[in-house]
Amino acid sequence: MDINEVLRYMGCPPEQAAPQTRALAEQAAAQMEQTARPRSVFRESGLSITGDGVLLESGLLLPGRDLARHLAGCDRAVMLAVTLSAQADTLIRRAESRDMALALALDCAAAALVEEVCDRLEGEIFAKYPGCHFPFRFSPGYGDLPLSVQSGLLALLDAPRKIGLCANENHILTPRKSVTALIGVSREPVGRAVRSCQSCPGREGCQYRKSGGHCGAS
Amino acid sequence: MELHKLLEGNKPILLDGGMGTMLQAKGLKPGEPPELAALTHPDWLLDIHRAYVQAGAQIISASTFGANREKLARTGKTVAEVVPPTVEIARRAAGDQALVALDLGPIGQLLEPTGTLHFEDAVNIFKEVVRAGVQAGADLIFIETMTDLQETRAAVLAAKECCNLPILASMTYEANGRTFLGCDVASCALTLEGLGVDAIGVNCSLGPGQMEPMALDFLKWSTLPVLIKPNAGLPDPETGGYDITPEEFAQSLARLVDAGVKLVGGCCGTTPEYIRLLAQAVSDRTVPNLPRTVPAAVCSGTQTVPIDRVRVIGERLNPTGKKRMKQALLDGDVDYMLDQALEQTGAGADILDVNVGLPGIDEGEIMVRVVKALQGVTDAPLQLDSTDPQVLERALRVYCGKAIVNSVNGEDGVLDAILPLVKKYGAAVVGLTLDQGGIPKSAQARFNIAQKILQKALSCGIRREDVYIDCLTLTVSAEQEGAVQTLEALGRVKEELGLKTVLGVSNISFGLPVRPVVNQNFLMMAMTRGLDLPIINPNIEAMMAAVRSYHLLMNIDKEAREFIAAYGTESSQPQRAAASASSTRSLAEVVEAGLRGEAGPAVDALLETTPPMEIIDGILIPALDRVGARFEAGKVFLPQLIQAAGAAQAAFEVLRTHLAKSDGESVSRGTIVIATVKGDVHDIGKNIVRVLLENYGYRVIDLGKDVEPAAVVRAAREHKAPLVGLSALMTTTLKSMEETVDLLHREGVPCKVMVGGAVLTPGYAKQIGADFYARDAKQSVDIAKEVIG
């Protein structure tokens, strides 16, 4: 795992990290990699762009303008879901009652790890579409795509059964260290911005980021 | 046809095959809810059920897998609209050829602690389905494809509490023998057999070959009929097809019938053809009647502890004689309890006793809270310790696994009140050898009480292996002849009744010098007489050393592996002492450098010369202020701020213990209630805030996450808190924050409200009526200083 990434999530510029902080990040990354049980599932869907948003072939509407704009030129998208599983949450919870600095580091290590798992999965997905182009993966909560689409996406992916990933009544993913996203597939080149806090629409208002943390919702 | 007759016979019982994959083959579109098939495609359902009955299935499952109100919410239909026609179609197809099972699958939301769904809500969701299914004529309940043992328990209790139908229960495992949520076969088997299901097993996820080890484990860990319903092998990710032919499938399952599996069928990818060949393959077989005895064992949802050697029960989660623990209970400081729990399991405790009985608190409510919190952080099974049957029942209800109930005694009233609870929830029970006449002096009289308790337990349907007897330790300085009687009774209970034994050891040495020596030797004597479950403080190294030595000398710890792992690199004890002795840093330096391990010793040293409040105001807080200022200036970062806070927290812990002992002044500058709002599960930010506030000497009542607005109001009133802090991370839970602020205002609670969290802005905070917006943890301290001082 990239320790600098963990440090960044911890709100600590890697080049200024005290040795003690770096050691903490390394310890947390090792524990998290050992404990997490990453699982993932993905599935392709045809799509059409309508006045209301993006309509998947199953009939699920992903409302709003931002995703529709993002997927311009794509006739298909791959839906994906990734989770580090309940064991990652338990590890963080266990640290929270004893050592909050370690808990923070574990939380950030999990955020970095889930991104890494997504990146790897994305690589696999790209390989299935030779010659195609992909805008960055787009998750519920970005722009005006509401979190309320989570349960519909999870159902289409059969994610509760296949990887044990659910959403609660407020559309929060549980286990917590999880991601759902769509990757558009286009035959024509698309602009592919890097997907991170940098491109997160919530960036400006995000106090977690300003205070040096990461939302963990990715 | 009756299920009980089938289960009693020696012939294998045929279940049906896949439903979801069959509906897809008929043309059900991706995303189309299969639970509505009875309304949208009744002819398809009828065809599929009939094909299974014709293939030889003796039990078919109605397509009610997802027909609960949570999953149906997306469809706009209700349980009452969906379940009856779905069961009726199965009924029609079954005729008098097959039994119809009401099928219960997962709710689709995770329960606490991973999710936010409360246990009783899960029970009620299942009850609604069960009532509708029973009314529509189901013959039995089939709970299947579960990954969470707690959710499975909720379904079983729901079924048991609203009908008398037989229950089959099955979970789904990965190839490593655990479910997604970490439940293993032994824990599942012990827990569900304890709850009184009629058959138990495994379905979905895997093919028959990979399921074999799990099926064998179920045979080992339960005496119930075992069921398996594998997939048709593993799915091909490209085509969605499965890789095992009906012939291979039938042959694999036939071999498992020979091994003792009683109910066989198929899950995803299997078709009537699979079931037809399976019926042929097993028709002339009988299920061997194996001698099956399940050893004494307890478990959590993720870990089984067989009582096949000395197992240590940690005694520290108990306020008796512990002022710091009393204070934690009064403050609702669950984290202190969790810390004590993890310290004990780290030191070698296998099981944790939990006692929260204290005048002035709602024992039942705190017990539930502590049990739930413990389950979120430890795999160790729990021993639920209370004299109040209502408290025990509440704890047993939320406890996921097979608990130990501590305790009953020889009094009829106690036995009659508590043993039925032990039976209902499938726990083990500690029987104290005392009765209305007190603790008998003689070993014989104690043995007689043990016998009585055993008989009563057996007559309640509790198995012999689940009765543990405590022959009671008396203080040897008061009654010197008592120790011998205890050991004598213990030996006889073990030998003549064949029961497991429990004993609290430390009482033996009250009033004597060198207590640890007496305790250690008494423990060794008791183990030699057959003590299985010593209740001790595992943090005292001499006690754990005795247990480890016993296992070594009795040839239980093979090749001395555990002994060498514990002591091979010299004793860890002197090393720790050396580390603290070598510290020459001042407390201020320790805090600023975030050296948690050195904080306690540094405070201890200071306490010899300096009053506690002077340490707090003169050293700790200025040190924290300096770190805080450097944080604000961007010279140090969040991890260092928290590490400094962690060191200060360790220092405070020593001060609190010191003050609790001396009954002196409180270190509190004022009380702050904090909570992560209803629906939200992201609470690490709030927890960071708590640590910082505590370090500045505020008493923080932390209500946890997913907290109802009314609970915040109640706590703010009860603790007369001048400041309430609320956090929310997601846009979807800001509404709950607004509701909470609103309720505090409407109820006229005289407090200020500060809010914080990722998606909040100062503007929004103002809009929802909060008094303060906290940008980060440091600022929450500034706000507390402004409001409280």
Image: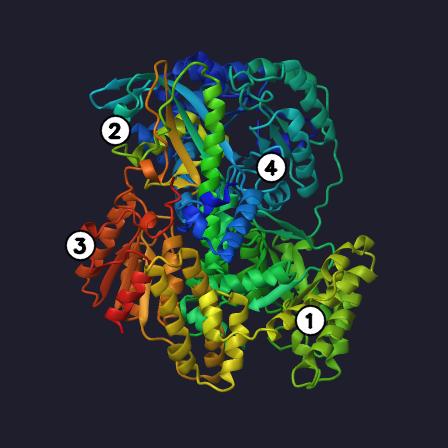
Q: Position of residue B541 (x, y in %)?
A: 68, 69
Q: Which residue is mark 4?
A: B200
Image: A168 above or below B687: above
Residue A66 is tagged as 2
Subunit that carries the residue with mark 1: B
Q: Amino acid at mark 1?
A: Pro
Task: Judge from the rendering whether residue A59 lies leftward or rightward of residue A32; answer left or right.
Answer: left
* Residue at horizontal 75 percent and vertical 56 percent from the top: B562
Q: Nearer the viewer, mark 4 or mark 2?
A: 2
Q: Quadrant of residue B467?
A: bottom right
From the viewer's side, name the closer residue of B388 and B346. B346
Q: Which residue is mark 3?
A: B766
Q: Earlier in the sequence, mark 1 or mark 3?
A: 1
Number of residues whose C-alpha sits closer than 10 Å to that of mark 4, classed few (under 14), some (14–19) or many (20 or more): many
Q: Amino acid at mark 2?
A: Asp
Q: Amino acid at mark 3?
A: Lys
Judged from the image, the secondary structure of the residue bearing numbered disc 3 is: helix
Residue A6 is tagged as none
Give the CA distance from mark 1 to mark 2: 63 Å
Subunit that carries the residue with mark 2: A
Image: A85 above or below B5: below
Q: Amino acid at mark 4?
A: Ile
Residue B574 is tagged as 1
User: Could you confirm whether marks 4 and 1 are on the same chain?
Assistant: yes
Task: Judge from the rendering whether residue B346 lies leftward or rightward of residue B748; answer left or right.
Answer: right
* Residue at horizontal 68 percent and vertical 75 percent from the top: B473
Q: Position of residue A58 (x, y in %)?
A: 35, 19
Q: Position of residue B155 (x, y in %)?
A: 47, 41
Residue A137 appears in the picture as rendered: yes
User: Could you confirm whether marks 1 and 3 are on the same chain?
Assistant: yes
